[in-house]
Image (cartoon, rainbow, N blue to C red):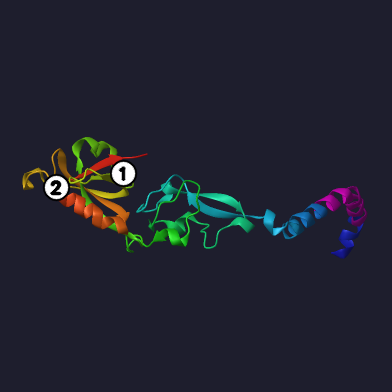
Amino acid sequence: MFARLLPHLPLWRRALRRRRRSLSLLVAALAVVLVLPALVPASMQSTPVVVAAGDLPTGTELGPQHLRTVEVASSLVPGGASSSVAELEGERLAGPVAEGGAVLPADVVGAEGPAIPEGTALVAVPVPEVLLPHLAAGTRIELLMSDPVDGTGSRVPAEIRSLSADAATSGPPVSPGSSGTEALVLVERQSAGDVAHALGAGTVTVSVIG
């Protein structure tokens, strides 16, 4: 078999000499591809990070439509940041996350975890029918409270967590002009007592804010 190959050796040598330059360039390019990543400073290397695809309110149960992946310089990646959208699907936000913000472990609770962030309280507030088209989970509102004795007023920021409609036949409206619908709203814990007192006096007005 070796004897049959001998006549072809000169042809192979000439072919290799003709292609030596191309082969050298190919080997050099392969070496650059293998070595270059190790030479790039860590500050210039990037890492995929999952961020909010839009402004996400407290209580959002995360799905693919709420998240996207961006490349971030490795030195700037926050601790605990996720690199896969699938890792966060089904989690619920413990607080709001602005568009483009990384969704971190402190921002989420499990789907079965507590829905009330620390330092807050849930209060049921009747809402007028005219506002219903503008209300949904995550809507930011203000509770305008007035004191019937001295006429002073105060504002308490709140966020709607859910809306629950009562049957119209269950009784009279909770307050004049109300629709029989109550909003479960999230307020700061220190404001919960004042809100409850104002609700008892019927001096709370709901205002939708941007």
Q: Quadrant of the C terminus?
A: top left
Residue at x 82% of width, y 54% of height: 28
Determine which residue is flagged by label 1.
141
Residue at x 67% of width, y 55% of height: 45
Determine which residue is flagged by label 2.
166
Which amino acid, by three-letter code, is at mark 2?
Asp
The reply to whether the C-beta atoms of the residues labelled 1 and 2 are less than 8 Å apart is no
Residue at x 79% of width, y 57% of height: 31
Q: Regarding mark 1 in the picture, which secondary structure is present there?
A: strand
Asked whether, in this view, residue 70 is left or right of residue 85, the answer is: right
Near-viewer residue (149 or 171): 149
Cα distance in 3D space between marks 1 and 2: 21 Å
On whether residue 22 falls in the magenta region, the answer is: yes
Mark 1 neighbour density, 10 Å: few (under 14) some (14–19) many (20 or more): many
Residue at x 20% of width, y 50% of height: 198
Disc 1 or 2, which lies upstream in sequence?
1
Asked whether, in this view, residue 146 is left or right of residue 43, the answer is: left
Magenta stretch, main secondary structure class: helix
Q: Position of residue 80 (x, y in %)?
A: 52, 63
Asked whether, in this view, residue 203 is left or right of residue 100, the answer is: left
Near-viewer residue (171 or 200): 200
Which segment is the magenta one? 9-26
Q: Position of residue 25 (x, y in %)?
A: 84, 50
Which amino acid, by three-letter code, is at mark 1?
Ile
